[in-house]
Image (spheres, grey):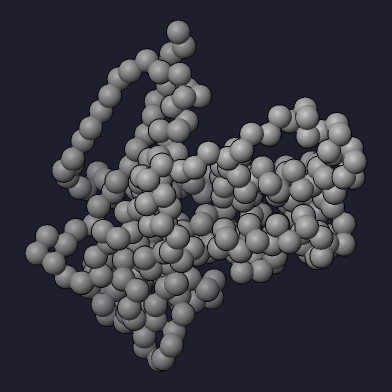
């Protein structure tokens, strides 16, 4: 093992991938990483450093901001081990002008605590099963809404789908690992009330278009209950921090999820979008 490989394994686990294989296959495998799994596994074992091009792919597959301290530390470790302590200290470090990290605000610290819960990575195979059609999507959403065990009859009642259709879909979900069956007739999904870590958008491709179509179909049958809209002139780089805050706000929605019937128990779609209209 090396310092770089130790840091890479730490970030991979923090991202919710239990194994190197899960990370490799969950992000597109050989087609994305442009290398074999054996080669990536040797990188995690400290047998060799990745090339800069492959390091870029690894960083893109990790669900962290490129400017985050974790990604910066990983990159600095790679630079140190690639060029040696002397060149790193005397040449690279002065050029990089590294500043001490800033402390998080109380709001950011609170939100980080809220999102420190279980993270579940979703593979491409699982994503395809979830998005196969509107029926699969509805079943996946319902199962993810409650961490308890379900029966096919309960899922059919909750989605309005025929029992035979539900049995077929649950069987497909079991094959991909989307649901587990602790005992005959009952099943649950590890995704329930968890932070879902999807494959990189570059890997998902048209699957995410299918996701948007499914969500649009659900929204078309729903009712808007809340809306805020602003039209403003702003610097896109400065607005990046606002987008990151919105990401954390969405991650912090988990405490509001209901797993028991309430007076106004509802399925909801909450989203934030920014549209760039024109350049000044």
Q: Is residue 208 above or below residue 243?
A: below
Residue 34, horizontal then vertical, whole percent: 78, 49
Can residue 187 be seen in this snapshot?
Answer: yes
x, y (%) of residue 211?
A: 43, 49
Quadrant of res 170: bottom left
Residues 117 and 113: in front is 113
Residue drawn at point x = 78 percent, y = 34 percent: 93
Instruction: List x then y, in percent, for residue 147.
Output: 35, 74
Outermost residue toward the top in this view: 280
Q: Is residue 226 left or right of residue 155?
A: left
| Residue at left offset 43%, top offset 64% | 117
Rendered view: 116 above or below 62: below
In the image shown, does 273 or 221 lie closer to the viewer?
Answer: 273
In the rendered view, does 236 fall on the left or right side of 51? left
- For the point 36% across and 65% down, the residue is 193
Report the front residue among 17 and 178. 17
Q: Is residue 60 left or right of residue 228?
A: right
Quadrant in which the N terminus appears: bottom right
């Amino acid at each position: 093992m090396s310092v770089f490989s130790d840091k890479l394994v730490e970030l991979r686990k923090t991202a919710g991938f239990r194994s190197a294989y899960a990370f490799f296959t969950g992000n597109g495998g050989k087609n994305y990483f442009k290398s074999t799994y054996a080669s990536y596994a040797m990188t995690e074992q400290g047998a060799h450093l990745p090339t800069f091009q492959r390091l870029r792919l690894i960083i893109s597959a990790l669900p962290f901001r490129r400017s985050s301290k974790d990604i910066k530390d990983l990159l600095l470790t790679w630079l140190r081990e690639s060029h040696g302590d002397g060149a790193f200290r005397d040449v690279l470090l002065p050029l990089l002008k590294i500043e001490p990290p800033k402390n998080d605000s109380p709001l950011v610290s609170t939100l980080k605590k809220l999102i420190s819960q279980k993270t579940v990575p979703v593979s491409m195979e699982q994503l395809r099963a979830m998005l196969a059609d509107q029926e699969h999507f509805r079943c996946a959403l319902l199962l993810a809404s409650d961490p308890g065990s379900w029966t096919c009859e309960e899922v059919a009642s909750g989605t309005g789908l025929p029992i035979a259709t539900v049995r077929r879909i649950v069987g497909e979900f079991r094959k991909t690992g989307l649901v587990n069956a602790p005992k005959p007739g009952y099943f649950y999904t590890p995704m329930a009330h968890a932070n879902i870590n999807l494959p990189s958008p570059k890997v998902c491709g048209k699957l995410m278009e299918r996701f948007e179509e499914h969500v649009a179909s659900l929204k078309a049958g729903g009712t808007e209950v809340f809306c805020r809209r602003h039209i403003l002139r702003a610097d896109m780089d400065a607005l990046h921090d606002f987008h990151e805050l919105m990401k954390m706000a969405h991650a912090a929605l988990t405490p509001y999820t209901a797993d028991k019937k309430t007076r106004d128990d509802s399925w909801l779609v909450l989203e934030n979008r920014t549209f760039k209209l024109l350049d000044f």
